[in-house]
């Protein structure tokens, strides 16, 4: 039976008030009363976000007459029974400047489908049509999205135009975010496939040429990794191009992956301007982000854990495998910068050393495994607080070290014949390549050791058990040595330490984290304390705290004055030598 498509129509109508109007037409609603739902979360960001709270008003009509619509849960509504076509109209407040939400003012509009499109229960697999309308004040705006235009229909959008777009089902509809406005745009092809770079925000003299050249190399290297013989880009199963949409702000960093595009947030100072030749660390971080989100086009958007195939958008979807989907992606993001020649080996090793140092700084890595951290992403990793370094491990950072370790283990055990690349290619051909074309299967929670064995002949089950279900550190020293790289540790500072992390808030030095078992913890200090003085000398900045401590030696006791809330407290702290937690990597 051929069902009628669900028609959505979206108009950004109130730029000052940041409001979208959405109209929805369902030709054959559930005769018992149509249920409508908005996702509780957005895939890729594992936190219940309650997007439904931004729906200001909603009403429904059946063949022209008003029908009752009733809230039935946090994210769901039910319309009274309707014989004929059901029309639903609602207003969404769009003022969340993040890659996860929707944002609209007189300069641009951006949205994720998860914020704006209600899903009619029972009609999830129906074809969706989306009619995009320009705001009245800016008819000259253009549309940037990987969502395909609705070819062959009278109101079909032209490339970058307003009008009709289409998606094969609801899952696809919400996986193509849309940017509208007058951004700076560059285009390139990688392995014959079209890519677009879209930058929104004020950006004088942006060096688009340089960014385009670098991103092209990264994309080509990744396509060659997964499809060495066909060089076929993965997103061609759902779009005619890949779109990088970047919102540039004064201070921001982040990204969210989609099947044929990514939404990024970057700081203006991180992007190169024309005439500046140095490739600073900040720009490398931006390219690392681009590389990370692009790698997700394979790893998590098509190769998925069974728990995400399909997503249940009404509640948390638990998997113990985010160390694969975020960790492996974090390992390959920088590695692909190296392989594509965007950074050199020295820079790569410095970036890897930084990750190793960050993981080894957190005592929480001995309390929580990366598999547990994956499962608890919803309630712990995404809800971090001052104690998180003592209690959690990052499935991103430690997951990337697990990937690095596994890669080196496979190379060592196979005498250099196999690598983690072979595992990625097996996962791709078995689960990913046809995921949106009749596949749809995900990776079982316990499948990784078997996949590694099958792809490489190496038995890594003990390694995987120790470092993902167990909390052991990855033995990087010996593994790196097998690749000709030496690892050593040095203290972060010559000065003795309180083992705390500080931040400056309104010219006051506040303790952000007190590391468990460190000098500050033993002395009785707490996160949130405002450090006033060390032995009577005023503390005003992080740097002057380090200067003050530099005139002491480990083993000496200092008197600290802090404000806890509005009460002055006094603590005596026995200073310790700065621990050797900074990793240094060098080629032997
Ligand atoms: Zn990621």
Image (tube, rainbow, N blue to C red):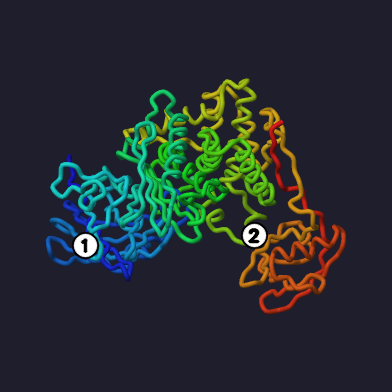
Residue 475 relative to residue 167: left or right: right
Q: Nearer the viewer, mark 1 or mark 2?
A: 2
Is the residue marked 1 within 8 Å of ligand 1, measured from its CB? no
Query: Which residue, given by chain and number where applicable, does mark 1 sit on?
Result: 80
Quadrant where the C terminus sits is: top right
Query: Which residue, given by chain and number where applicable, does mark 2 sit on?
Result: 387
Which of the 4 image quadrants contains residue 482?
Answer: top right
Q: How many labels sit on residues?
A: 2
Label 1 Cα crowd, 10 Å radius (few <14 / some 14-19 / many 20+): some
Q: Is residue 433 above or below residue 62?
A: above
Q: Which residue occupies the foreground of this view, 568 or 393?
A: 568
> Residue 532: x percent and y percent?
73, 73
Q: CA distance from mark 1 to mark 2?
A: 49 Å
State the residue at coordinates (33%, 60%): 108
Quadrant where the N terminus sits is: top left
Which of the 4 image quadrants contains residue 240?
Answer: top left
Q: Which residue occupies the foreground of this view, 533 or 248?
A: 248
> Residue 95: x percent and y percent?
38, 65
Nearer-N-terminus badge (1/2): 1
> Residue 526: x percent and y percent?
70, 66
Residue 91 relative to residue 529: left or right: left
Q: Which residue occupies the foreground of this view, 586 or 21?
A: 586
- Can see residue 468? no
């Amino acid at each position: 039976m051929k069902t009628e498509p669900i028609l959505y129509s979206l108009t950004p109508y109130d730029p000052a008030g940041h409001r979208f109007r959405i109209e929805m037409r369902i030709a054959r609603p559930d005769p018992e009363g149509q249920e409508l739902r908005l996702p509780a979360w957005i895939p890729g960001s594992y936190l219940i976000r309650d997007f439904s709270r931004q729906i200001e008003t909603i009403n429904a009509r059946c063949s022209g007459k008003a029908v009752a619509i009733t809230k039935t849960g946090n994210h769901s509504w039910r319309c009274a029974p309707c014989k004929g076509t059901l029309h639903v109209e609602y207003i969404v407040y769009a003022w969340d400047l993040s890659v996860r939400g929707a944002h609209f003012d007189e300069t641009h509009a951006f949205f994720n489908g998860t914020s704006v499109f209600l899903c009619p229960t029972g009609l999830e697999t129906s074809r969706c049509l989306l009619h995009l309308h320009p705001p009245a004040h800016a008819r000259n705006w253009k549309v940037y999205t990987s969502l395909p235009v609705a070819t062959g229909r009278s109101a079909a959008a032209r490339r970058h135009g307003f009008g009709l777009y289409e998606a094969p089902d609801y899952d696809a509809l919400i996986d193509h975010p849309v940017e509208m406005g007058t951004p700076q745009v560059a285009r390139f092809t990688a392995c014959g496939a079209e890519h677009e770079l879209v930058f929104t925000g004020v950006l004088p003299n942006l060096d688009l040429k340089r960014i385009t050249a670098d991103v092209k190399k990264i994309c080509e290297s990744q396509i060659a990794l997964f499809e060495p013989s066909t060089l076929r880009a993965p997103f061609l199963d759902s779009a005619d191009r890949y779109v990088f949409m970047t919102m540039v702000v004064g201070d921001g960093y982040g990204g969210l992956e989609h099947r044929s595009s990514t939404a990024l947030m970057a700081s203006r100072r991180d992007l190169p301007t024309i005439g500046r030749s140095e490739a600073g660390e900040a720009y490398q971080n931006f390219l690392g982000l681009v590389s990370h989100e692009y790698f997700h086009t394979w790893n998590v958007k098509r190769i998925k854990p069974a728990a995400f195939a399909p997503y249940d958008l009404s509640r948390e979807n638990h998997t113990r495998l985010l160390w694969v989907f975020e960790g492996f992606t974090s390992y390959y993001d920088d590695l692909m910068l190296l392989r594509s020649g965007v950074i050199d080996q020295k820079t790569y090793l410095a970036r890897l050393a930084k990750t190793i140092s960050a993981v080894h700084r957190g005592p929480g890595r001995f309390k929580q495994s990366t598999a547990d951290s994956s499962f608890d992403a919803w309630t712990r990793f995404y809800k971090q607080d001052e104690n998180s370094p003592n209690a959690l491990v990052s499935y991103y950072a430690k997951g990337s070290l697990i990937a690095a370790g596994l890669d080196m283990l496979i190379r060592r055990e196979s005498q250099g014949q196999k690598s983690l690349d072979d595992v990625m290619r097996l996962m791709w051909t078995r689960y990913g390549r046809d995921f949106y074309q009749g596949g749809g299967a995900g990776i079982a929670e316990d499948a990784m050791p078997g996949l590694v064995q099958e792809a490489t002949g190496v038995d890594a089950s003990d390694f995987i058990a120790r470092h993902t279900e167990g909390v052991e550190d990855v033995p990087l020293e010996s593994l790196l040595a097998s690749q000709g790289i030496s690892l050593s540790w040095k203290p972060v500072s010559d000065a003795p330490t309180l083992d705390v992390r500080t931040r400056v808030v309104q010219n006051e030095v506040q303790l952000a984290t007190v590391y468990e078992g460190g000098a500050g913890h033993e002395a009785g200090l707490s996160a949130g304390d405002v450090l006033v003085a060390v032995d009577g000398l005023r503390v005003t900045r992080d740097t002057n705290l380090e200067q003050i401590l530099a005139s002491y030696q480990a083993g000496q006791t200092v008197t600290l004055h802090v404000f806890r809330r509005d009460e002055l407290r006094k603590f005596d702290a026995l200073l310790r030598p700065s621990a050797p937690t900074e990793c240094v990597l060098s080629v032997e």
